């Protein structure tokens, strides 16, 4: 028979051997910590981009219809009918409303009768004048009769002219009973319903018609911006041979770019069209106007919209540009981290210019074209410390830079978690070892 105590003893020693083996493996993996100077952190650097950059002035403006007309009743009467659908397009001359024409038709008929009567009086005066002249020539009539009928004839002629003018006025009033659109555009709603009396005390507003293609945009310049625009305008008209005294401002073809509140950038292109003659002394600004194509139905631009505008002023030759994300900000101002020839990071304060397409920022002062700017790993670049610079393209570093920093933080987090797990495992093994030692001691005692 097997001795149970002996078998248990061997099992205990086997467990101890396994535990010792695990402890030895862990101890072999975790060598004694010795200080080793870490290598310089890797950062991505790039030289600034040099290219021509157009400088712009930016404004805010308001759109206004190219043409807008108020349709009013020019004669009084009851509104008889409406011949359009509100909110639709109409063409010049289309019938919109009809005012009751009966009264005005009667006036036309009366005026026509007066014309006929005046013409008859004129004809009778002519006949009597001819008869008086003939009798006078035959010494059978008095000269006074000739003078009398000559006067009657002239009065009759004037009466005909007056009657014809009255008829013309009656016909005009009759035509005003048919209200037509004065221009091509989009008609608004009817402001007066059918059956109402209109035009009695004043010309009643019936509706409006708006032309939206092209579209005007009005904006204002302050004094400093105005002087820049004037300098640019003088140069443009000189180069293009435009005479500002005889030709409109749009002949200079100065471009304007427009963007709406829900649009990125300035996708709409137009031209400078007009400027007021004097500066408003109350606001110290000058109002300008641009004109923009506005095709489509419905068009993208509507009257009364708030807009963003920019106008090119000049071109900055060989401007220095860096990724906008590489810029830092502190209490002193904007700065860049630059790696010198000794691979040491320097904090360089700079003056910035416009933000251009591609996420690049113009640097106007404080940076040279051959400097190495840290564009990735900015958090690892400490001013005064050495780094391991890696070349990168500045135009492609905005998003990867953030991703790299995130990956670095994730790596550190995983190492910390691994160390924590090893520490817990070592604690558990120590507890198991203590329990085994206690069990062996108790079983070996007689």
Image (cartoon, rainbow, N blue to C red):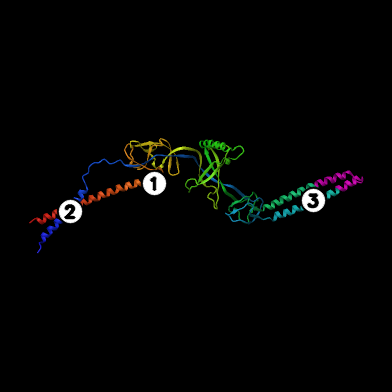
Nearest to the observer: residue 285 or residue 28: 28
- At mark 1, the secondary structure is helix
Q: Quadrant of the C terminus?
A: bottom left
Q: Label 2 belongs to which residue? A: 19
User: Quick one: label 1 or label 3, which is nearer the N terminus?
Assistant: 3
The picture places residue 90, in percent across and down from the top left corner, at 60, 53
Q: Position of residue 129 (x, y in %)?
A: 85, 47
Between disc 1 and disc 3, the foreground one is 1
Q: Is residue 310 above or below residue 188?
A: above
For the question of whether residue 284 can be seen, the reply is no
Q: Does residue 402 appear in this view?
A: yes
Q: Residue at x 71, y 50 (%)?
A: 169
CA neighbours of label 3 inside 10 A, class few (<14), some (14 to 19), many (20+): many
Q: Which residues are magenta?
A: 129-155
What residue would you read off at disc 1? 399
Residue tagged by mark 3?
119
Q: Residue placed farthest to the bottom in the image?
A: 1
Instruction: Name the residue nearer the viewer: 116 or 389.
Output: 389
Q: Secondary structure at mark 2?
A: helix
Q: Is residue 131 magenta?
A: yes
Q: Is residue 24 left or right of residue 77?
A: left
């Amino acid at each position: 028979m097997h001795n149970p105590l002996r078998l248990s003893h061997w099992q205990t020693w086997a467990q101890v051997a396994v535990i010792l083996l695990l402890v030895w493996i862990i101890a072999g993996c975790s060598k004694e910590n010795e200080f080793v100077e870490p290598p310089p952190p890797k950062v991505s650097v790039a030289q600034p981009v040099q290219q021509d950059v157009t400088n712009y002035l930016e404004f805010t403006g308001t759109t206004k219809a190219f043409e807008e007309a108020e349709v009013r009743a020019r004669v009084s009467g009851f509104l008889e009918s409406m011949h359009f659908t509100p909110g639709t397009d109409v063409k010049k001359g289309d019938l919109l409303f009809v005012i009751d024409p009966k009264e005005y038709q009667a006036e036309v008929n009366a005026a026509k009768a007066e014309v006929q009567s005046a013409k008859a009086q004129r004809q009778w005066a002519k006949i009597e004048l001819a008869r008086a002249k003939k009798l006078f020539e035959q010494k059978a009539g008095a000269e006074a009769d000739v003078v009398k009928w000559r006067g009657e004839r002239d009065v009759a002629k004037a009466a005909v002219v007056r009657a014809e003018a009255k008829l013309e006025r009656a016909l005009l009033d009759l035509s005003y009973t048919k209200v037509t659109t004065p221009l091509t555009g989009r008609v608004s709603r009817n402001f007066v319903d059918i059956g109402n009396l209109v035009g009695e005390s004043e010309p009643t507003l019936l509706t409006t018609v708006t032309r939206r293609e092209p579209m005007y945009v009005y904006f204002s310049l302050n004094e400093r911006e105005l002087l820049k625009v004037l300098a640019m305008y003088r140069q443009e008209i000189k180069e293009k041979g435009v005479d500002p005294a005889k030709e409109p401002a749009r002949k200079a073809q100065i471009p304007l770019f427009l963007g709406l509140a829900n649009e990125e950038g300035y996708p709409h292109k137009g031209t400078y069209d007009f400027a007021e003659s004097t500066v408003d002394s109350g606001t110290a600004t000058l109002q300008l106007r641009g004109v923009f194509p506005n095709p489509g139905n419905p068009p993208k631009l509507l009257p009364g919209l708030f807009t963003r505008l920019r106008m090119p002023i000049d071109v900055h030759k060989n401007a220095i540009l860096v990724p906008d994300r590489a810029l830092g900000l502190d209490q002193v101002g904007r700065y860049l981290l630059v790696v010198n020839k000794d691979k040491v990071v320097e904090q360089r304060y700079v003056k910035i210019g416009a933000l251009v397409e591609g996420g690049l920022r113009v640097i106007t002062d404080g940076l040279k074209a051959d400097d190495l700017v840290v564009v990735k790993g900015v958090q690892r670049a400490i001013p005064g410390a050495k780094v391991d610079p890696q070349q990168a393209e500045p135009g492609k570093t905005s998003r990867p830079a953030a991703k790299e920093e995130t990956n670095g933080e994730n790596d550190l987090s995983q190492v910390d978690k691994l160390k924590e797990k090893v520490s817990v495992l070592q604690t558990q093994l120590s507890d198991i070892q203590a329990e085994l030692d206690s069990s062996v001691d108790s079983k070996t005692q007689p």
